[in-house]
């Protein structure tokens, strides 16, 4: 299962003095990068943010990665399991991974099938704060007939298996070392989580919380000695500062820039901008158990009252695309008949009237003496969130809905429930969410009844037997026509029940120095091939 993830090159500067070599401000073989989001952990099983995945992917490896063209690439596995090569059994119940023989952990210990078996067990253990076990909870057991073979026996067929198990799913988990962690009861709060040992192309030198992570090349990396010698990944919460440092040639990579920075970035010389299509969405997420937005009519009214096309132009400067439902239009499972990206204010007002909300003296609708006010959680450290919150407030006021903006840091808004996350703990009414999914259209970790926290990402607390049935069909059939029909139903249910209002489909904005070569982001993990980078 692959996905077309083609980078759209927006602007390319020159490659160096006279078009050859590197510029004098570039530090040879040293990558200087910055991101606006902070990391809470460096253990990939405990992560909940894209910024954490970037930080961890220098250190850890998946079994299977995905390249910039959407093709599955074996990393720790020596081949991608398929039906054709026998890696996936004909009944869909067995996935066999043949592992590379020359892989070692950073401390020199050999990587074996026992590490794979252990990590699956760690994910399924109730003793650790794993954000989601989706897909992994379909594993009956992992057999290890020898040191270099791991056989996943499934309880039932699971169509996204190869793109989920230690691959680039919406929770891109990596394999952990059994010899270091096998005796730990829980992965929570271990010293390992601050300076982990991986198999990846770079080793962590130190992590200065709230400041930076420093890496050194792993010269024994099994896919080849990394060309970069050192990486410095800094946390800079102000994107204006990152742009200024990029302009001053103090940085080589602005990681996942927000759309708000795009106009400034276009004016920075000697910087290449890539807009990378991704399977993701930006939305208003609702706590469907919290009145009054436990009423689907109100949620649909919010969606119809928002001018998504105007929002895309004013807030994201055209770097995103107005969304209908969650699956972007370039994906094979996209259903053009479900949902809308057009504003229909009269239809929104009719839904509010049908739900009993009448215009009040100040223009805000009322019901039983209660004003229709929507608390909207957003990220204070995101300029895009701040700006779109204000624009949405203005649009909804025209429908008679007042908005009260509630600001939180990215780390707090997206933290797991055990750490008081606003969305995961259900301590919100509505919120602005950015969601990056994997290379498969599987969206069930947000929509199945059994994926509610603390075991999954169903932060809306949405539960519908019809949705569960459609998801089950999509997850248990490997053939694409059956899955496409299932996703059409899923999109129609999303449009009807509106646990989310999908605003736009994002594209990753990666700003890199023209002296950085080999950078080929795939829309999920931008640094999946970092051992090939050079500067």
Image (spheres, helix red, strand yellow):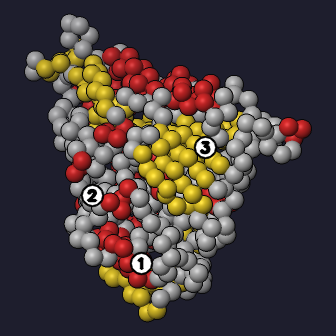
**Marks 3 and 1: CB-CB under 8 Å?**
no
* 459 horizontally vs 249: left or right: left
**At 10% across and 21% down in the image, what residue appears?**
368
Q: Is residue 165 above or below residue 523?
A: below
Which label was assigned to residue 32? 3
Q: Is residue 211 above or below residue 468?
A: above
Residue 271 drawn at (x, y percent): 71, 35
Q: Nearer the viewer, mark 3 or mark 1?
A: 3
**At 61% across and 53% down in the image, what residue appears?**
230
* 123 horizontally vs 58: left or right: left
Compare residues 19 and 323 and report the one nearer the observer: 19
Residue 189 drawn at (x, y percent): 27, 58
Which label was assigned to residue 189? 2
Compare residues 83 and 228 and report the one nearer the observer: 228
Reading the chain from its start, which is encountered first: label 3 or label 2? Answer: 3
**Circle 1 residue:** 115
- Tell me if I can see residue 111 in this picture: no
Give the distance between the C-alpha atoms of the residues marked 2 and 1, in whole angstroms.
Answer: 20 Å
Compare residues 288 and 421 and report the one nearer the observer: 421
Give the distance between the C-alpha atoms of the residues marked 3 and 2, in whole angstroms.
Answer: 29 Å
């Amino acid at each position: 299962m692959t996905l077309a993830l083609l980078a759209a090159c927006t602007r390319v500067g020159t490659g160096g003095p006279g078009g050859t070599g590197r510029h004098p401000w570039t530090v040879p073989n040293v990558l200087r990068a910055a991101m606006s989001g902070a990391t809470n952990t460096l253990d990939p099983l405990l992560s909940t943010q894209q910024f954490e995945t970037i930080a961890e992917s220098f250190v850890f490896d998946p079994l299977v990665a995905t390249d910039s063209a959407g093709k599955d690439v074996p990393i720790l596995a020596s081949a991608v399991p398929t039906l054709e090569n026998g890696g996936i059994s004909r009944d869909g119940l067995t996935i066999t991974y043949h592992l590379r023989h020359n892989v070692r952990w950073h401390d020199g210990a050999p990587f074996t099938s026992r590490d794979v078996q252990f990590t699956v067990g760690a994910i399924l253990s109730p003793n650790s704060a794993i954000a989601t076990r989706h897909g992994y909870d379909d594993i009956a057991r992992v057999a290890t007939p020898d040191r270099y073979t791991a056989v996943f026996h499934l309880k039932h067929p699971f169509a996204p298996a190869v793109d989920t198990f230690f691959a680039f799913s919406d929770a891109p988990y990596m394999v952990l070392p059994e010899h270091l962690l096998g005796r730990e009861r829980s992965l929570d709060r271990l010293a390992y989580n601050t300076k982990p040992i991986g198999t990846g192309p770079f080793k962590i030198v130190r992590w200065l919380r709230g400041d930076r992570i420093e890496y050194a090349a792993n010269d024994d990396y099994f896919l080849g000695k990394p060309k970069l010698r050192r990486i410095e990944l800094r946390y800079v919460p102000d994107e204006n500062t990152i742009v200024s440092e990029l302009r001053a040639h103090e940085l080589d990579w602005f990681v996942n820039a927000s759309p708000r920075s795009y106009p400034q970035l276009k004016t920075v010389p000697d910087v290449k901008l890539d807009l990378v299509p991704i399977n993701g969405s930006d939305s208003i997420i609702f706590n469907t158990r919290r009145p009054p937005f436990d009423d689907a009519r109100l949620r649909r009214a919010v969606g119809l009252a928002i001018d998504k096309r105007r929002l895309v132009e004013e807030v994201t400067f055209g770097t995103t695309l107005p969304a209908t439902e969650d699956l972007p239009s370039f994906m094979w499972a996209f259903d053009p008949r479900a949902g809308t990206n057009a504003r229909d204010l009269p239809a929104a007002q009719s839904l509010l009237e049908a739900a009993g909300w009448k215009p009040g003296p100040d223009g805000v609708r009322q019901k039983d003496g209660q004003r229709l006010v929507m608390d909207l959680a957003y990220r204070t450290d995101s300029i895009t969130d701040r700006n779109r919150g204000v624009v949405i407030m203005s649009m909804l006021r025209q429908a008679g809905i007042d908005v009260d903006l509630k600001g939180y840091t990215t780390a707090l808004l997206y933290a797991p429930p055990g750490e008081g996350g606003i969305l995961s703990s259900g301590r919100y009414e509505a919120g602005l969410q950015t969601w990056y999914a994997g290379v498969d259209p599987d969206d069930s970790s947000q929509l199945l009844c059994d994926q509610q926290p603390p075991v999954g990402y169903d932060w809306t607390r949405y539960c519908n037997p019809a949705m569960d049935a459609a998801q089950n069909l999509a997850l248990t059939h490997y053939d694409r026509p059956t899955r496409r029909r299932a996703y059409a139903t899923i999109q129609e249910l999303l449009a009807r029940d509106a646990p989310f209002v999908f605003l736009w489909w994002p594209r990753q904005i990666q700003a890199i120095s023209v002296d950085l070569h080999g950078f080929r982001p795939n829309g999920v993990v931008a640094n999946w091939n970092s051992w090939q980078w050079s500067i």
